[in-house]
Image (spheres, helix red, strand yellow):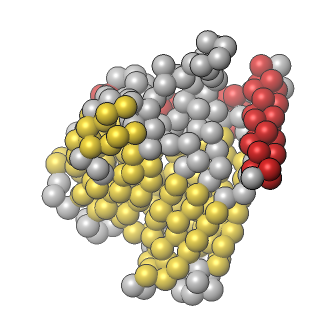
Amino acid sequence: MAEPMRIRASMVGGAADVKCLMNHPMENGLRKDAKTGQMVPAHHIITVTATLGGRQVLDAQWGGGLSKNPYLHFRVAGAKSGDTVSVTWVDNTGAKRTDEAKVG
Amino acid sequence: MNNLRRNVLKGAGATTVVSVAVMAGLLKPGMALANWNKAGFEAKDLNAALASIGGGGAVASGDVSVKAPDIAENGAVVPVEISSRIAGTESIGIVAEKNALPLIADFKLMNGAEGFVSTRIKMGSTSNVTAIVKAGGKVYRASKEVKVTIGGCGG
């Protein structure tokens, strides 16, 4: 159900430079629906993990304070061109999505 | 154009299915939350939010920088970049001090991940964006004020 992420990874000065764009509404539970006047229930990513070449490099916890369709950019030293970077998110409804890219 | 319309409609449909499932109790909102810092992310009080990520006694550091716009026209999308030049940076937390829910994110970095994280956050009003950096058992902080013209937190 969840739409794929876009991940781009490239070598910059000896480190892998990883940028990803996720598809998620990131509702923080504080917003009212303009039409119905009802509160929109919280629906946001709560954890993001990333591995590079099979080793875990990132373990993040998120609240609803990140922007809709969140953007994440991080760097990992000791990587090489051709390594696989894999990013997984899980949201507060239990939905999850994993996508991979090769370091270019 | 038409394809885009289809996708938008499909997207809206999918979201509705999820909310209906949540309401019907098929999906329990708590079920994926095992390790999630619920108290911190739901804290409305800045000090409680900071304490939940161990940032209560953080020391200001010039080696941590918070890059964000001076003025954000749209509080729904505020680019924030945190970099830490402290060796052995283990985690980076992001807090928007005056948001209804101040704690935004907490990134644990390992196995070569550098002290750098860049993302986009929502801000309800003009406020400091504070980074909490942990390295070698010590906790550091740095802040940058962002003036928000139109808040982006709803409500």
Pick out the residue farthest to the front. Answer: B1
> Which residue corresponds to the image point at 39% horizontal and 51% vertical from the top-left?
B79
- The residue sitting at 59% across, 80% down in the picture is A103
Specify whether A41 is left or right of B68: right
B142 left or right, relative to B76: left
User: Residue at the top extreme?
Assistant: A37
Measured as percent of width and height from the top left, residue B41 is found at 47, 32
Image coordinates of residue B123 in percent, x first then y, are 38, 35
Closer-to-camera residue (B120/A13): B120
Residue B75: give x, y in percent of width and height: 39, 37
> Where is residue A49 drawn, in percent x and y?
59, 57
Measuring 26% from the left and 67% from the top, which residue is drawn there? B85
**In this view, A11 is above or below A24:** below
The quarter of the image holding the C terminus of chain A is bottom right
State which quadrant residue B98 falls in.
Answer: top left
Comparing A55 with B101, the one in front is B101
A95 relative to B88 in the view: left or right: right
Q: Is residue B17 visible?
A: yes
Which residue occupies 64% across, 78% down? A102
Image: B4 above or below B89: above
Find residue B101 and report its image quarter: top left
Q: Nearer the viewer, residue A95 or B90?
A: A95
Tell me if I can see residue B56 in this picture: no
Q: Quadrant location of residue B71?
A: top left
Q: Is residue B62 left or right of residue A81?
A: left
